């Protein structure tokens, strides 16, 4: 099957990728992406690349697609939005202050469970957590 996204590197792109790999300071994901692009430029199939780079074929496909759409920017991580914060800055300050205060009687130190219970009783966080769970 012919790949939908053909990777054709210019000489400067090829030398830049080789220099990055020879430098030895890249993260694992960036290294694999560079190896995928170089192998795809040589004409290897997605399955061959996945086997040689020890990655999934979907990773190879996504890397090819990103290169065709974005160029060498495909090597870099995209931002990950993450979950919305449950604590407001005020509630977060309260949590830190509580954790720095002496623990309840009969306890040597605060546990996460105790901190969670205390913050819920001191704030309206209980309603926010229920809304986030839905």
Image (cartoon, rainbow, N blue to C red):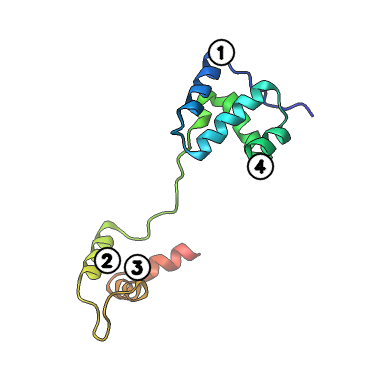
Residue 36 rendering spot, x and y as whole percentages: 61, 31
Q: Which of marks 2 and 1 is nearer the N terminus?
A: 1
Task: State the image coordinates of residue 26 (x, y, percent, origin top left).
Answer: 46, 34
Identify the disc placed on residue 56: 4
Q: Nearer the viewer, residue 3 or 92?
A: 3
Residue found farthest to the right: 1
CB atoms at circles 2 and 3 under 8 Å apart?
A: no
Distance from disc 1 to disc 3, alpha carbons, whole Å, reads: 57 Å
Q: Is mark 3 on a helix, strand or loop?
A: helix
Q: Is mark 2 on a helix, strand or loop?
A: helix
Would you name the residue on which mark 1 appears? 11
Residue sitting at x 57%, y 26%: 67
Q: Earlier in the sequence, mark 2 or mark 3?
A: 2
SS class of the residue under badge 1? helix
Q: Residue at point 62% right, 35% down?
A: 62
- Give above or below for 109 relative to 91: below
For the residues bearing labels 2 and 4, Cβ distance under 8 angstroms? no
Q: Foreground mark, 2 or 3? A: 2
Gap between marks 2 and 4, in whole Å? 42 Å
Q: How crowded is mark 2: few (under 14 residues within 10 Å), some or many (20 or more)?
A: many
Decide if residue 89 is on the left or right side of residue 15: left
Q: How crowded is mark 1: few (under 14 residues within 10 Å), some or many (20 or more)?
A: few
Could you tell me how far apart the alpha carbons at marks 4 and 1 are, in whole angstroms? 27 Å
């Amino acid at each position: 099957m012919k790949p939908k996204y053909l990777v054709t590197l210019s000489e400067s792109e090829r030398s830049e990728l080789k220099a990055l790999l020879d430098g030895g300071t890249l993260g694992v994901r960036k290294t694999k992406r560079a190896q995928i692009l170089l192998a795809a430029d040589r004409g290897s199939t997605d399955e061959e690349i996945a086997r040689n780079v020890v990655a999934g074929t979907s990773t190879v496909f996504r890397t090819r697609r990103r290169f065709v759409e974005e160029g060498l920017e495909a090597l870099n991580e995209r931002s990950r939005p993450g979950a919305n914060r449950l604590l407001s800055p005020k509630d977060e300050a309260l949590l830190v202050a509580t954790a720095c205060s002496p623990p309840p009687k009969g306890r040597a130190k605060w546990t996460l469970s105790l901190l969670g219970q205390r913050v819920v009783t001191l704030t309206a966080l209980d309603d926010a957590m229920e809304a986030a769970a839905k």
